[in-house]
């Protein structure tokens, strides 16, 4: 029987499999700590929840070569300025609503979900809401009674999911907050609703 | 022993008796996946269909959940199938394993009934604990998550204890470590946070690390066993290659997670990590091609189970095209910016799940049915062989039709909705109304019907194959 | 830093990326087949497939604007060299891991060839 090459032996590859797996996993853990610290609300890339007290826009950044969210002048949601705790409670309620109503199985959020309805990453900034003065109330009304509104020429509609007014307002808060996340330029070429005074 | 060709559980060992239970539920859930996929597809063509009764969100949720669960049942069953053979002793704690099977199955039934009958809840923690967690693929409410983890732990106990008491082979070792990861990673998806970026960061741990790492390795273990059993390849070679595969899969797969971290709020360095590991993706495929040719050139492949071998070959092709070609086409961030979250993803998802996993589990169905009928003849000249051949053909034609149709739709969507219209609401609907998209959805539905026909034939074949055979399979050792 | 694909280059991006995998697979296939069947005549075909792979990688690099940034140039070079060498490396691994089996080729009791039966097609 011929001699076995060390690089083709079972034990060499067993060790390799273990070391490569463990090594990759360690690198992943290390990166996870860094990433999570950067995407914690109030961190570098994901603003604190009280950002909903401000105007949020999405503008091209020359140095990064894509659009980034910009936090502007004070423009409280529903005209009511909230503390960080109050804002967090509201966004939490909104996030719970998006989960309990299963939004993600028609829509995408940050591009993940289903493809039967529009992406919601920048829903807060969508020009379809007309003007910034009516946007908030339109969104609330729409969420509560979407089933008989004209959405599009395809006949595709959003069903009535029994969203209460409080839940709708919280959902709008969640959507406004989500629009402030730095998503590395996703979606690209997005043209926002006019928010200038 | 009863007559050859009769279904008789005395032909099976303890683990295998449990395996066929898992396989039976898996087939039923496979049917549910196809059915609810058809309903959801029809809603693209006629949005009023079942509107307000079974909305798209419900159908789509059942469609993708049924897939995850039936593949999981298929994998659990496959592992129980090989456990006694591989370890050389009866399954340790089989009674507990049986109990876990019934608990898991009951939980799945309750979860699906709640999905269909309750559908949505109020925006509160109670809803995500009891009704639906609303996170793609892992919608199962929290109580069911806990149940799943408990059942997987029982499964882990069965596997680990059996190998420990019996013979701890290389395949067994990889399997046990892989199951630790499988159970552990699921925990990453089991908590609520208002922060959608953190949410999706951990969500990808479950989805990517399950699907593109631990499942791949699990399939590698099943394949290794399959090669030893159906072709008689030597253990030492098979196990060495299993380790090589683990090194390649985990080496490119774990940090391959990076290609999901481009757009969810995570830092820009994930572009470089995602890009680098995307470039590595083809290496395991090249390894597979070279090794397959090497083996085929040195051995005459003769199998005792033609349908199973055909599905294993289909797995190699499906994995190459579905995961490899379809994945690489839009994995670089420079293009993924425009394809992320379009029908591109649906096209890749359909083809890759089918090619890499469905094919493998179906191969195990055939391995199981052969032994269940007393190791009946299932090679050339098999009575009624047209059924398995046509089932294989129809399932592939249906899947390819769906994949190509979704690809066309996604290509149009990436251009019109994403690049030109900038993903606005109006841009989304402009793309959805484009004739390429509408045609794509029609062809996808046609593909769906063909696939459904293939599924019906597959089930019929699984219930009847080998029934009228009178000859036993020749064993490889003879 | 990434520079997204321009609209006019979408098709080229998808097509060249698909061709990277297809030609890569074809190169591996022809390479291995040529070696396993001892048909060196096929080897030029294998390298023709690699030439296709080389062109596809460059087309992808052009379409996806990879050549304007140091890191991405590195990725392109890695692909060009890595995909060239990968089949060679895997082949050596195949030969190395199957040595025992190949040495035993003299005995025809090869595990594969035993399931012969008159009904075998």
Image (spheres, coloured by chain):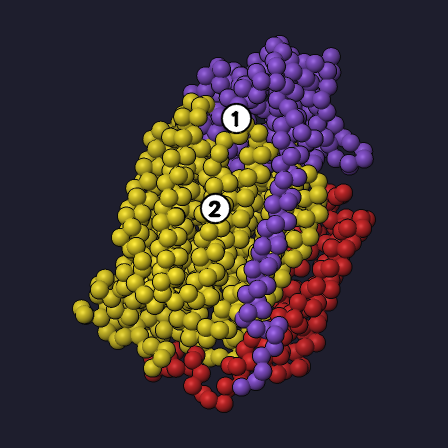
Count residues near mark 2 (Cα–Cα under 10 Å), then give few for <14, some for 14-19, many for 20+. few
- What is the drawing colour of chain B? yellow
Asked where in the image residue C42 lies, by quadrant, the reply is bottom right
- What is the drawing colour of chain A? purple
Lateral position of residue B75 relative to residue B406, left or right: left
Separation of residues labelled 1 and 2 (CA atoms): 25 Å
Image coordinates of residue B94 in percent, x first then y, are 29, 55
Q: Which residue is mark 2?
A: B184
Task: Write down which chain is painted red.
Answer: C
Count residues near mark 1 (Cα–Cα under 10 Å), then give few for <14, some for 14-19, many for 20+. many
Q: Quadrant of the C terminus of chain B?
A: bottom left
Q: Which residue is mark 1?
A: A95
Instruction: State whether residue A139 is above or below residue C84.
Output: above
Question: At 57% across and 13% down in the image, what residue appears?
Answer: A137
Q: Nearer the viewer, residue B297 or B192?
A: B192
Disc 2 secondary structure class: helix
């Amino acid at each position: 029987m011929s001699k076995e090459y060390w690089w083709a032996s079972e034990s060499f590859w067993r060790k390799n499999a273990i070391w490569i797996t463990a090594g990759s996993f360690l690198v992943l853990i290390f990166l996870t700590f860094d990433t999570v610290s950067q995407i914690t609300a109030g961190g570098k890339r994901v603003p604190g929840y009280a950002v909903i007290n401000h105007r949020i826009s999405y503008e091209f950044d020359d140095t990064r070569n894509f659009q980034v969210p910009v936090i502007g002048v004070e423009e409280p949601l529903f005209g009511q300025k909230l503390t960080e705790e109050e804002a967090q409670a509201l966004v939490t309620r909104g996030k719970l609503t998006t989960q309990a109503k299963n939004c993600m199985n028609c829509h995408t959020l940050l591009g993940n979900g289903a493809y039967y309805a529009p992406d919601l990453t920048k829903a807060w900034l969508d020009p379809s809401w007309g003007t910034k003065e009516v946007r908030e109330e339109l969104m609330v009304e729409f969420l509560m009674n979407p089933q008989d509104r004209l959405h599009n020429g395809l006949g595709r509609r959003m069903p009535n999911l029994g969203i209460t007014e409080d839940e709708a307002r919280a959902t709008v808060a969640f959507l406004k907050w989500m629009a402030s996340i730095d998503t590395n330029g996703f979606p690209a070429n997005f043209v926002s609703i006019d928010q200038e005074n | 022993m009863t007559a050859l060709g009769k279904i008789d559980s005395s032909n099976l060992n303890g683990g295998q008796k449990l395996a066929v239970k898992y396989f039976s539920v898996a087939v039923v859930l496979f049917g549910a996946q196809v059915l609810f996929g058809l309903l959801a597809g029809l809603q693209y063509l006629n949005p009023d269909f079942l509107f307000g009764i079974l909305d798209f969100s419900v159908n789509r949720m059942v469609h993708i959940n049924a897939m995850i669960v039936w593949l999981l049942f298929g994998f659990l069953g496959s592992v129980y199938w090989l456990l006694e053979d591989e370890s050389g002793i009866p399954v340790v704690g089989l009674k507990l394993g049986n109990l876990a099977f019934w608990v898991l199955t009951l939980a799945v039934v309750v979860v699906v009934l709640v999905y269909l009958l309750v559908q949505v809840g109020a925006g509160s923690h109670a809803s995500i604990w009891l009704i639906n967690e609303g996170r793609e693929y892992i919608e199962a409410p929290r109580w069911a998550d806990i149940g799943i983890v408990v059942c997987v732990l029982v499964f882990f106990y069965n596997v680990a204890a059996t190998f420990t008491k019996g013979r701890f082979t290389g395949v067994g070792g990889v399997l046990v470590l892989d199951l630790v990861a499988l159970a552990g990673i699921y925990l990453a998806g089991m908590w609520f946070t208002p922060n959608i970026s953190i949410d999706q960061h951990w969500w990808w741990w479950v989805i990517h690390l399950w699907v593109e790492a631990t499942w791949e390795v699990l399939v590698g273990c099943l394949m290794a066993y399959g090669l030893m059993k159906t072709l008689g390849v030597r253990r030492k070679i098979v196990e060495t290659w299993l380790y090589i595969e683990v090194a390649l899969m985990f080496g490119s797969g774990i940090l391959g997670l990076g290609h999901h971290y481009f757009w969810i709020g995570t830092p820009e360095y994930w572009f470089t990590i995602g890009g680098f590991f995307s470039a590595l993706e083809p290496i395991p495929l090249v390894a597979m091609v070279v090794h397959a040719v090497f083996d085929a050139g040195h051995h005459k492949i003769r199998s005792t189970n033609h349908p199973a071998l055909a599905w294993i070959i289909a797995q190699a092709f499906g994995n190459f095209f579905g995961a490899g070609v379809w994945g690489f086409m839009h994995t670089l961030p420079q293009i993924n910016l425009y394809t992320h979250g379009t029908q591109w993803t649906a096209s890749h998802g359909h083809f890759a799940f089918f090619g890499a996993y469905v094919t493998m589990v179906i191969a195990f169905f055939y391995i199981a049915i052969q032994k269940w009928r007393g190791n009946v003849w299932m090679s050339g000249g098999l009575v009624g062989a047209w059924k398995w051949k046509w089932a294989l053909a129809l399932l592939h034609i249906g899947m390819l039709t769906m994949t190509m149709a979704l690809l066309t739709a996604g290509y149009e969507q990436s251009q019109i909705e994403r690049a030109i219209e900038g993903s606005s609401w109006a841009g989304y609907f402009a793309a959805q109304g484009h004739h390429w998209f509408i045609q794509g959805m029609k062809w996808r539905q046609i593909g769906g019907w063909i696939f459904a026909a293939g599924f019906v034939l597959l089930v019929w074949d699984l219930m009847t194959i080998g029934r009228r055979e009178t000859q036993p399979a020749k064993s490889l050792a003879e | 830093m990434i520079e997204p694909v321009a609209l006019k280059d979408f098709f080229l991006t998808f097509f060249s990326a698909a061709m990277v995998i297809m030609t890569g697979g074809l190169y591996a296939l022809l390479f291995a087949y040529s070696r396993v069947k001892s048909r060196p005549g096929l080897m030029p075909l294998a390298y023709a497939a690699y030439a296709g792979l080389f062109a596809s990688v460059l087309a992808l690099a052009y379409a996806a604007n990879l050549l304007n940034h140091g890191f991405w140039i590195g990725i392109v070079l890695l692909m060009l060299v890595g995909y060239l060498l990968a089949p060679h490396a895997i082949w050596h691994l195949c030969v190395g891991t199957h040595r025992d089996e190949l040495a035993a080729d003299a005995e025809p009791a090869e595990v594969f060839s035993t399931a012969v039966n008159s009904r075998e097609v």
